[in-house]
C-alpha cells in the first residue's frame, strides 16, 4: 500500500435537522442523539471513518466523554461488533487532545497540545500515518473549518428539531466547494453524508 503524501483531516459531527449539534438549554445532554446513533447507518458511517485513520484529534471535554465510555464497550456482552471495533481503534490509536487545562494525559497513547488546532494539524500532517479523525469536537472542527484545514467533512443528520443551540457552521467560513462522496439513509430517517473538500 502506498503512503499518502498528505494525511487527510476528517471531521465527524452529528447534527439535528435544524442544524444544531447540542441542545440550547443543556449542551452536555446528548440523549437526543442516542436513538439514531445505534442505527446501522450511523454505525457503518463511523466505521468507514475510523478504519483509514491512525490518529484521533479531540477537545478535552469530548476526550473525557469518549475515553470514559468507549473502552467499557470492549468485551461488553451483546455489544455490536462495529461499536467494539471503534472502541478498540480508539484505545489503540494515537490520540491528541487539545487542552489549555490538562497538564498530562490520563489516557494511554495520548498527547496533550495547548496550541491552536490548525497548528497541531499542520504538525500531524507532516508526520507519517493515516487519516486524522476529529470526533465530534465542535470547537476543534469549527477552528479547522475556519482555517480551511478540513479535507473530509462527515455528518450524520438526525430527524429532530432542537429548536436552538450551537451551530457547527458559523458565518464567515472560507468560501469553497465540497463534493459528495458517500451518502446513506436508514432507520428512523438517519442520514449520513460524507463530503470531500474540492481544492
Image (spheres, rainbow, N blue to C red):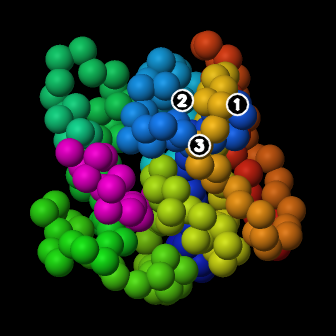
Q: Earlier in the sequence, mark 2 or mark 1?
A: 1
Residue 131 seen from this side: no
> Judging from the image, what secondary structure is the residue with disc 3 in?
loop
Mark 3 nearby-residue class (10 Å; few <14, some 14–19, many ≥20): some
Any magenta on residue 21? no
Residues at marks 3 and 1, CA–CA distance in whole angstroms: 12 Å
Q: Which of marks 3 and 1 is nearer the N terminus?
A: 1
Mark 2 nearby-residue class (10 Å; few <14, some 14–19, many ≥20): many
Q: In which quarter of the image is residue 84?
A: top left
Q: Please name which of the two marks, 3 or 1, marks the residue nearer to the observer.
A: 3
Q: How many labels does the image show?
A: 3
- Closer-to-camera residue (111/160): 160
Residues at marks 2 and 1, CA–CA distance in whole angstroms: 15 Å
Residue position for label 1 = 17
Place of residue 178 in the rendered image (x, y in percent of width and height, measured from the top left)? 82, 58
Q: Please name which of the two marks, 3 or 2, marks the residue nearer to the observer.
A: 3
Left or right: where 198 falls relative to 129:
right
Discs 3, 2 touching: Cβ within 8 Å? no
Left or right: where 61 falls relative to 185:
left
Residue position for label 3 = 165
Left or right: where 66 falls relative to 109:
right
- Closer-to-camera residue (137/93): 137
Residue position for label 2 = 42
**Residue 89 drawn above or below residue 159:** below
Q: What residue is at 86 percent from the left and 62 percent from the top?
A: 177
Q: What residue is at 69 percent from the left and 40 percent from the top?
A: 19
- Magenta highlight range: 53-68
Q: What residue is at 66 percent from the left and 78 percent from the top?
A: 147
Amino acid at each position: 500500500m502506498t503512503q499518502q503524501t498528505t494525511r487527510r483531516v476528517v471531521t465527524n459531527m452529528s447534527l439535528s435537522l435544524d442544524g444544531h449539534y447540542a441542545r440550547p438549554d443543556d449542551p452536555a445532554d446528548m440523549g437526543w442523539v442516542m436513538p439514531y446513533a445505534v442505527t446501522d447507518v450511523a454505525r457503518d458511517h463511523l466505521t468507514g471513518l475510523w478504519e483509514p485513520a491512525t490518529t484521533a484529534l479531540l477537545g478535552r471535554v469530548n476526550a473525557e466523554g469518549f475515553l470514559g465510555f468507549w473502552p467499557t464497550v470492549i468485551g461488553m456482552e451483546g455489544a455490536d461488533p462495529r461499536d467494539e471495533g471503534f472502541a478498540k481503534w480508539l484505545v489503540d490509536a494515537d490520540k491528541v487532545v487539545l487542552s489549555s487545562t490538562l497538564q498530562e494525559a490520563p489516557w494511554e497513547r495520548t498527547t496533550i497540545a495547548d496550541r491552536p488546532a490548525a497548528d497541531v494539524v499542520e504538525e500531524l500532517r507532516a508526520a507519517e500515518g493515516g487519516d486524522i479523525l476529529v470526533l465530534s469536537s465542535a470547537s476543534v472542527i469549527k477552528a479547522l473549518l475556519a482555517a480551511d484545514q478540513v479535507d473530509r467533512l462527515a455528518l450524520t443528520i438526525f430527524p429532530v428539531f432542537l429548536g436552538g443551540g450551537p451551530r457547527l457552521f458559523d458565518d464567515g467560513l472560507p468560501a469553497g466547494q465540497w463534493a459528495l462522496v458517500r451518502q446513506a439513509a436508514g432507520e428512523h430517517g438517519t442520514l449520513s453524508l460524507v463530503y470531500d473538500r474540492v481544492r
